[in-house]
Image: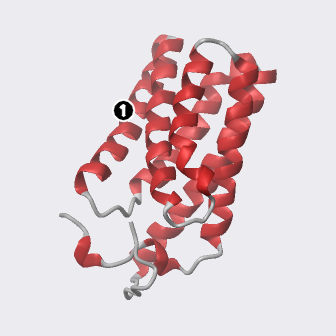
Amino acid sequence: MADPHIKEKLDAWDKISIIVYRTGIVLSGVALITLAAQQLFYPYWFKHIVLFLALGSIFQAATLHIYMKSVRTILVAATWIGIWLLTLSFTVTNIWLAYFALGGFFVTHAGLAYKESFCFSLFIIKFVPIILVVTWFLIVLSHSEIASVCLLLVGGLYLYMGWEKVNMPLHFDLGDRTKYEN
């Protein structure tokens, strides 16, 4: 996680990775809101919407700027396991694999929302991990109406974070390079 008061010199790769990360936040917000609509109106499109959420997860996990190597590894691995499970769910047409894939993406989104909560003054962002866990169980237990409300809330918070991130200087996302574990 970055220190906004430290301004590292950014090269082209740094700028690209930060822009891709921020794009992933916005994509995830849109995907979560789309998943909320899917829960209410389009029950057969679940895996397709989760695929859209996977794209947002990939963008964020692939360009993650977190100092602790163990946390980075967990968040990136959750996305890759989710991608593997989602791919497998399309191959063998198993909805449970898609549910577990969604859980993997939610792990990544929960961790990143918690990380980003330190950048924003909006306290409710710290509750996104809890809301995502509850939402996952609601989706699995077919409580679509309540799950869609939770997804709308989290999607709205993700879009808020995305909007705020887009308006921040790029160096805010990188911070002090000497603090990163190799």
Please state which of residues 117 and 108 is positioned toward the viewer in this rendering.
117
Q: Is residue 144 above or below residue 101?
A: above
> Residue at left 50%, top 40%?
129
- Amino acid carrying label 1: it is Ile
Horizontal and vertical percent position of residue 13: 40, 74
The structure residue drawn at horizontal position 58% and vertical position 65%, both measured from the top left corner, is 120
Q: Is residue 25 above or below residue 178?
A: above
Colour convention: secondary structure
The kind of secondary structure element at disc 1 is helix
Q: Is residue 144 left or right of residue 1?
A: right
Label count reads: 1
Q: Is residue 145 left or right of residue 63?
A: right
- Give residue 93's position: percent from left, percent from top: 52, 11
Q: Which residue is mark 1?
A: 81
Quarter of the figure that contains the N terminus: bottom left
Most extreme residue toward the front is: 123
Q: Residues within 10 Å of mark 1 (few under 14, many from 20)?
A: some
x, y percent for residue 46? 65, 23
For image coordinates 46% across by 71% down, the residue present is 173
Left or right: residue 68 versus residue 46 is left
The residue shown at (66%, 39%) is 32
Q: Position of residue 146 (x, y in %)?
A: 72, 24
Residue in the foreground of this view, choosing between 122 and 38: 122
In this view, 45 is above or below 12: above
